[in-house]
Amino acid sequence: MNLREQTKMQSPAEFDSDSKGPLASIQLLSGEPRRKLDARFRGLCVTIAAVSVLVLIGLLGSILLQGVPSLSLTLLTGGPEPDPSEAGIRPAIFGTLWVCSLCALFTLPIGVATAILLEEYQPRNRYGRFIYSVIQLNISNLAGVPSVVYGLLGLTAFVSMFGLFGSRTSQGGGLEIGVRYYDQFFSEGMRSILVPVSDPSQPVNKLVNGMQGFDSRGNQVAINVIPIGTPLPTGDELRYTLYEDGEAGRITKKAWYHFSLPLGRGVLTGALTLMLVILPVIIISSQEALRAVPSSLRDGALGLGSTPWQVVWHVTLPSAMPGILTGAILAMSRAIGETAPILIIAGIVYISRAPQNLMDDFTVMPLQIFNWISRPQEEFHAIAAAGIILLLAILLSFNALAVLIRQKLHKPLS
Amino acid sequence: MSSADSLATPTWRGDLDDRVSKYLGRSQRSLKLVRGRETVIYVILIASGLFSLLITGAIIYVLAIETVSFFKSDEVTFANFFGSTTWNPLLGGTKSFGIWALICGTMLVTAIAMSIALPLGLITAIYLSEYAPRRVRNVLKPVLEVLAGVPTVVYGFFALMTITPILQWLHGGFSVYNAASAGIAVGILCLPTVCSLAEDALQAVPRGLREGAYGLGATRFDVSVKVVVPAALSGIISAFLLAIARAVGETMIVALAAGSLAQATFDPRQQVQTMTGFMVQMASGDVSNYGTEYYSMYAVAFTLFIMTLALTMVGNIVRRRFREAYE
Amino acid sequence: MSDPTTLANEAAAIEPRPRDGRQTHFTHSREQTSEPTTLAIRVRDLNAWYGDFQALHAISLDIPANRVSALIGPSGCGKSTLLRWFNRMNDTIPSAHARGSVNLGDTDLLSRTTDVVDLRRRIGIVFQRPNPFPKSIFDNVAFGPRLHMKLSRTELQDVVEWALRKAAVWDEVKDRLASPALGLSGGQQQRLCIARAIAVGPEVLLMDEPCSALDPASTLAVEDLIFELRRQYTIVIVTHNMQQAARCSDQTAFFYEGRLIEVGATTTVFTKPKQQQTEDYVSGKFG
């Protein structure tokens, strides 16, 4: 093998002509086949690399081809209407915005804190080292858990909270704040009258004469109940007059700070579930960013009498910040595109408006797109493609932002 | 520094020296306070570190208790779950929970995906690490990054709307939902994963090994295939394992393109249902929150979790060993 | 090995050599050279390990106050290890541990209960490669004072100016205190690092081969500075460069394979070494 390798530089003929002791008598293999093999392999590589570029072009091209005709302002402003020409993605955009910002709010501190612990605080003894290696391996494993499994975890741990707080239905249940229940009557003057409900688990109120309620302007009124067949009063009194067979429907008014346990299928649950999905990603990228800070800086700060946290806060963290931010943005773009866990916890529901509070039902962009793709009508597929274009545009701008941060904020550290 | 300028005279010394020695002699910041804050922060950091362990614990706990509820049901037996290839949880009279039907579908899709992603990913990695000129790298790397960043629901759309029609045009036997189309899309999805992990492994091989081989007159092909790849083999294997785990757990593509008929088949033209596909079907349909079919979702998830955990765990341990070998 | 108790006396006899033609612009008020030297750091029977590898064997050494002590020896002889035990920088290496005693005044430096944060304020360190933080020049010097003292803005400015003047770099940087420290030349960076260490008011300055990454001109500037600073600080310098040890130290300790071979006044060690190994090393036969 070695002899063969050595002769590569010279052709066999040349080698024979100038006799070099014992080597001269050895039959040498030509280097030609190996060079051909090399060239062929290079060709194969180039072809395959070209194929991956072509696949990307094909992917983007086919989506543009199907989606561009459906790109319109309606897509941005409309809700998920059953008529394809009116359908839009606005509630889903707001859902994505809510869920992903909340998710970043939860994930960044925990993720960066974990990375700091693992990179900047050395374990104090053998048990510490063992626990660190367990945590480290655990994080790499969590990164490999399918996101759909996190969805099921969210379903039990957040949506129903192991049933610890009872189950929450539209009739209340569980613990809640920032919500008021009303029984809504419609007067014969077609005005709504709201009667406050103190215990939502009780059945809907029966109509009683003189019952106190609020009219649509918020004024307190006493409901005037009249027997069936009695002529209706005229004028203002009609606003709060009902026949005795009038029936109410239960409605709720939720404040912006509405909160309840169990969390239900709301925005907060979505954010917490996505947190589980991208936490390992953020931890790993933050660790890499911290590891890239030269240890001479840490030594310098320690040598001045900094405590470990002062080293982190004043030296390591500022130096690692561009890397951490880049990683965080890429993780967020993953969160934006994540569909399966959201689908598991939120299901496919008709959402026509942006979420109003943390407990509000929601949908996100990829889920809305999934919804459209799974419809049989061709028109919805075109809208799905248009939605995908929108989604990809957002993700690409996130990626561009990450690149920009990497370049702008990156400065030499030593 | 206006105060500094006024002092920049030869007489700075006495004045400044006295003042500064006064400052330095003054009482220092309370170390007790600093140390207290330090302890609080350390506890917070440890709590966040333990949080990740808590997540794993919670996953196992949740999946385990719900799976236990599943097996407690009269309609389910171990023998049926592990021994049958009929997965039919929804239809009233003839419910059957044979997990093999779903595992089979998962395996079929994964096998198709890996037959694309592993060779192509490895060769691309070798090309990027050993052959590619700078210019090509600068194009190829971002392309792979973009491919890796595309949401899976987009790949699902691509599979259903582009790959399937092409397959049907090539061969009439493909049904609208089929394993091949989903497998190809999953393969494209996994390609960047394989490529970047394998490239990391190849890059970790010390330069000296390559230089030694080149010094003996080896061609680039000899160096890459006979020296670098064997040296990086365990790293490459770990890349493969992690990619397989990713393919097994892939959800949206199979939910859209593979179909929803659970059957044990090895015909890529047929529709199949994977474990993840079943969970999506359950979540997007109107299924009550308490029936056996609802709990079956957790039993399937537990099976999936154990499979992917085993793959990633082995993959990560192999990767760690490999890295240690070259550090 | 010589009896440690005599070492202090020997060190006390050291007179700083006059350095003609090396006039710095400092004319310091406190002239301590005629006073008897006091003891700054006392090392007794120090053994240190990295994991199973014993890096130091039974070291006993006295570091006199307000003098420059040089630790010399070939690479891997343990001189840096010893230096890094003086302010417990070795705590950052998980496998490092030590037995024996190292005292700064009444403080036992190796004790578990010693507050390393306070210790490192009292014993500053300057590293082999200049390692300014990626901040402005001002913020670099102000880093330590901000951690340890409550100072008003003008007071902080005073401290920064004072430290930079002491480190003989003020004139070069006074017009660009807000610009990044990494823009300075290597020699300036190293003097900035010295200023940074001085600014917290330490008693001892440890220097781990402070000139090895610098060009000859910068080396000269830093050596001048070291010689000047010993009037106020006890300085321990680790160096590879024997000329440097000869030029700017009062006491020299020679280490070989983790053992202290010889210690004494620098002139004695370089001209009339007692041990054969020292002579071989000093004359360049190995190292």
Image (cartoon, coloured by chain):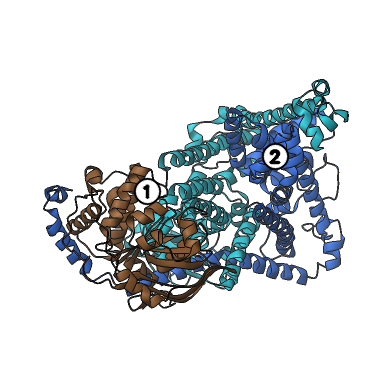
> Where is residue B308 drawn, in percent x and y?
71, 56
Q: Residues within 10 Å of mark 2 (few under 14, many from 20)?
A: few
**Quadrant housing residue B168:** top right
Residue at x-position 51% and y-position 54%: C287
> Closer to the camera: disc 2 or disc 1?
2
The chain coloured brown in the image: C
> Where is residue B18 drawn, in percent x and y?
15, 63
The chain coloured blue in the image: B
The residue where tag 1 is placed is C134
The residue where tag 2 is placed is B212
Q: Is residue C102 visible?
A: yes
Q: Are marks 2 and 1 on the same chain?
A: no
Residue at x-position 43% and y-position 70%: A208
A254 or A13: nearer the viewer:
A13
Judging from the image, mark 1 belongs to the subunit labelled C
C140 or B75: nearer the viewer:
C140
Mark number, residue A55: none
CB of mark 2 within 8 Å of CB of mark 1? Answer: no
**Quadrant housing residue C54:** bottom right
Amino acid beneath label 2: Gly
**Quadrant housing residue A33:** top right
Q: Residues within 10 Å of mark 1 (few under 14, many from 20)?
A: many
Q: Is residue C51 visible?
A: no
A283 or B219: nearer the viewer:
B219
> Where is residue C1 drawn, in percent x and y?
47, 72
Amino acid beneath label 1: Pro
Q: Colour of chain A?
A: cyan
